[in-house]
Amino acid sequence: MIGTRVKVSIRCLRCGERFVLRGKEEKGRIETGFKMCLCNNQVDFEIEPTP
């Protein structure tokens, strides 16, 4: 079964840059394919589904 499409807001906790992406929600997990911020941060993010 294909996951539900959701809009996701991602904020970098190092530089404050914000990204809005679409992702798939499957089994309580959201997958967007987002890997790295412009400041080369790969781990410190705040990820929230947006209404």
Image (cartoon, helix red, strand yellow):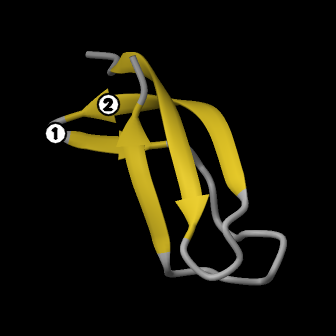
**Is disc 2 placed on a helix, strand or loop?**
strand
Q: CB under 8 Å between callouts 1 and 2?
A: yes
Name the residue: 32% across, 21% down: 3
Q: Is residue 3 above or below residue 29?
A: above
Please, is residue 21 above or below residue 31 in the view? above
Q: Residue furthest right?
A: 38
- Specify few, some or many for label 2: CA neighbours under 10 Å numbering under 14, 14-19, or 20 or more: some
- Viewer-side residue, 25 vs 49: 49
Q: Is residue 43 left or right of residue 42?
A: left
Q: Position of residue 13 (x, y in %)?
A: 54, 75
The residue tagged 2 is 25
Disc 1, SS: loop
**Furthest-left residue in view?**
27
The N terminus, quarter of image: top left
In the rendered image, residue 47, in percent from the top left (x then y), is placed at: 42, 52
| Residue kind at label 2, given as amino acid type | Glu
Residue at x-position 64% and y-position 36%: 20
Q: Quadrant of residue 5?
A: top left
**Pick the front one: 16 or 6:** 16
Query: Going 15% across and 37% down the picture, which residue do you hit?
Result: 27
